[in-house]
Structures are given as structure tokens and as C-alpha cells.
Image: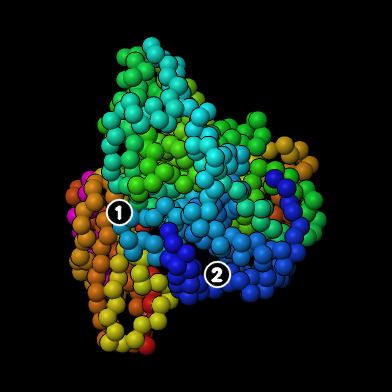
Amino acid sequence: MTDMRRRVFIKSSLVSLGAGIICTPAWSQKINMLSRSMEQGSASEAFQPPMMAFPEKKPLWMHSDSPPLLETPREAFANAVTPNDEFFVRWHHAVIPDTIDLKTYRLSVSGNVDTPLELSLAELKSRFEAVEFYAVKQCGGNSRSNFSPVTSGIQWHHGAMGCALWKGVRLRDVLAAAKIKPNSEFLKLNGLERPILPGTPPFMRKLDKDEFNREDVIIAYQMNGEDLPLLNGYPLVLIVPGYFADNWVKMLERIDVLDKDEPVFYTDKAYRLPANPFGSVAPGDPMPKETRALKALNIKSVIATPSENAVIHRGDQVEMAGVAFDAGYGIKEVLVSMDHGKSWTSATLDKDLGRYAFRRWSYTFTPSKSGILTLMSRAINRLGETQPLPANMEWNPSGYAWNAADHLTINVL
Amino acid sequence: MKIIGITQSLAISFLLASLSVTAEDAATPPFAGKTIDFPKAYVYQMEKGEGYETIQKCSICHSFGYILNQGKQNRSFWEHETHKMIEAYKAPISPEEEKVIVNYLAKFYGNDKK
């Protein structure tokens, strides 16, 4: 990425993202304003995160610096592919290696196997067939800030997601090379991040037999044709396409094959939905005793452009654009509305980049009357599944899997 | 995690420096692999008041961004969250400290709703 492009991005972000931006000379003023507003017990909602550039990243919304929680600005989803330096960042623990030395880095495969492996990156690349495909990575809590009442958890807007071209090797090929025993039931997977305290559960994940035998679960070493940014898990990330990102593992270092289940916090206790088929409870109710793991994505679309509160002139052409995706059944249609859902029409779908990719959509219209317009988008997939309208969105105590029809308002002068 | 007190001018310098980081600046080390410099700790302005010293313990594991990001919530919410930190994540917080933390959050980041 050149200097020029970066400056243009920053400039356009500063212009389009309004009050939330920390502009250089006004930055200290902004911090003072926020402090003052807190002292006065301001009625404002969540803290406005500053935009910060981390290594290998453009400025992103920084919900936390440690562990880093960096959100992609909404306008990035006017494109089907999310560049590496715009891709969101979310770690669970604060001890993240700042250096990876490929001489010593190894992916180990052990446990219920005949041939335990210690694979270097070079060996992984040379020994196994590479596959490459686009897939959406979406945090389980993406869009959580839309839930009402507020749930605990990071109050993401739509930007804890992205779509990249992933290149890697099949997990099942690696397991076959380790001569995984036929009675194997689960995998336990771990990356290099570590909690600060020894008692805190590490971010380990489990896959069951059906999942680890999928041909499209891969260990990726390239993202959009390049090495992974360190903050996105260099050198290896486990990709479970069609599943929420809590199932994906960054800086993958260890695969433990199990012949029976064992409890793993981040799969068995965290990232859970109420067990009922809707994965929901009445708004504000506590989590029930029976829960199930958050796995497959649900169908979703977001509007990336125009931006919220954009000012448009009557008679100007407006291009609505965004992306849609689901768990891999395929997007059939994206409906758009310019009158808050009273009427709908079909948007144009861009080229299909693959079942797990963002599907870009667009619709051009010319507003003929002044006033506030509420634009909406609603995707339908090949199974006929669609997004609920916001008023009908089901609620869950952890605020996972928000997928209501998207909406934003613009001002027509 | 250390809380570093930095002046506004240093903070502005940090911002300018961070804005000038490009994709190519991620240092190509002399070995095969990758290395980055994590930015210095961001200064989150938390309310000064009773309990301010005790809540510094929260930043053992995570930044204050996690609290601020949540927005103002009611006492029951903060009780639940603080308890989860101790029970699930093993935060080294005594029952007395837990009370102080909940009182602090309810007072300074509370919304008085039920």
C-alpha cells in the first residue's frame, strides 16, 4: 500500500466518519471533552472509540488497545474483498507474541495419532496441497450494539467482519499425515495468545468429527495473496468457513486429537446461545441452563454506502451498495427499500466470488422529494432464508449473531 | 499492563506517529518471519473517585476500553460482569474489592435503570 493511498483513506475517513474521528490538532480537545462529559455524568451512550493505526493496519476504530479490538469502518463493505490493512482485529488475551521466527515456529499435531508432527511453515507449504477460496470471517458479536436491551460484550457496529481470499492446506490432509486414529472424536486447537494470569482459561477451541473432516476447513498461511498481518494471526489461521469466527484460531500452534470429549472453556462455556431452535430468549432474560455452541453464520446484509446521515440533493443519483452473505448456501437476492420497508425492490448482485464470500450488491436511485429517507437492505438465500426486520430480531443474553435487515437514514435536501 | 501517564503533547506525537505507520513499516526482520512494535498503552481517562485505585486491578488483564465500550449500565449489570471476571476468568479480586469495584462502576458508569 502506498503512502498516497493511505493518506487518501485517512482523509476520506476523516471527512465521512464525522464526530467520532480524532483529528490531529483537535485530538487533545476531544479527549478533554470526553473526560468532561463523563465527569458531568453525560447521558451519551457508549464511549466513542478513537481511530488508531496499529502495525500493518490503517486507522481502525479502537475499542481496546490491549487485547486489541479494532473495528473496520462501515464503508469498507462497499467492496466484496476486505484488504488486509482494513481487516478487523480481535484477540481474547493480552499476551500476543510481537515476533514470529519461522526457524523456531512449529505447528504440532499430537494426541490420538500414530505419527505426531511438528511442522514448520515451509514444511506445511511444501508437503500439502494448497487450496484457495474467499470466505467471510465474522465475529460472533458483530453488530452487537444493535441489541436492545444492551447485552454485555464488545459493542461492535458492523465492522467486526471481513472477506478475504484465504490460501492454505486442508486440516484433514494434515491429520491424515499424522495418521489420526479412526476412533478420534474431537480436536482441541490452540494458538499462541496467552492470558496474563495463569488461571484464566486460554483461548482453545474444539472441533467435532464432522467438522474436522470437512474438506473446506483449512489452515491458511495467506490472506489476499500475502502473508497474514501479525494482528490477524501470522503465520497460520484455522479457517472454518460458514462458521462464526470464534471457531477460527489465530497463530495456530497446536492440534490435540482426542478420542473423547473434554471440557474446553471457550467452546463449552463461552460463545453459547440458548439451546432452543431460535437461539434466543425474551429480551432481558438470563441465559437458560440448556445452551448450544455458536457455530454456523446466519444470513446477513449490510449497507456500506451512502453513509449514515449523508446529505444528498434532490435529483442526485445515489448508489446504495453493500455486501450480503450466509453460511454457504448462496445469496439469491438482496432486496432494498428507500421508504423504511414499505416497499422493496431487487438490488443488482455483483459477481459471485464463491459460496463463503461477501456478495456485493448495489442499487442506484434518484430521490425526488426532500426529507429523511430510511434505506434498508434484506438478503434472501437459496433456501429462502431471510433476515428478520429489526423489530422482529430475536434477543440472546450474549448479543451474538445480530442479522436484522440493515438500515440507515440519509437527508435529502 | 502498565498505565502510563503521558502529557497531551506526547499523546499527539503518538497519534501522529501511529498515523504514519504504513504496511511496509512492519519491520522486515533479519530472520524469516515477522515482527511488529505494539503501540504504547493508550491513556483511558477513567473517573477519579472512590474506588479508582481498586479498579486499576481490571487493567491487569485488559484495557479500560472494555469498560468504557460497554456504555453506562445498571448496577445489576456491573455486578454480573464483575462476578464473571472473578468466576470465569479468575481475576485476583477479593470479595471486598469486588464490592468497591461494583460501587465504582455503578456510580460513575451507571445509568440508574433497572
Q: Is A336 included in the stretch rendered in magenta?
A: yes
Hey, which quadrant is residue A246 in on the image?
top left
Instruction: Give the residue type at disc 2.
Output: Ile
Residue at figure coordinates x 27%, y 87% from the top left = A315
| Image quadrant containing the N terminus of chain A | bottom left
What x and y, as percent, mark residue A242? 32, 42
Q: Which residue is mark 2?
A: A21
Q: Which residue is mark 1?
A: A358
Horizontally, residue A174 falls left or right of residue A231, namely left
In contact (CB < 8 Å): disc 2 and disc 1? no
The residue furthest top is A114
Eyeballing the image, is A379 above or below A297?
below
* Same chain, labels 2 and 1: yes
Instruction: Give the residue type at disc 1.
Output: Phe
Return the disc, 2 or 1, that comes first in the chain's sequence. 2
Horizontally, residue A349 falls left or right of residue A413, namely left
Inspect this view and state whether residue A181 appears: yes
| Badge 2 density bin: few <14, some 14–19, many ≥20, Cα 10 Å | many
Specify start and end residues of the magenta stretch as a single range: A329-338
What x and y, as percent, mark residue A189? 45, 29
Closer-to-camera residue (A73/A330) = A73
Badge 2 element? loop
Badge 1 element? loop
| Image quadrant containing the C terminus of chain A | bottom left
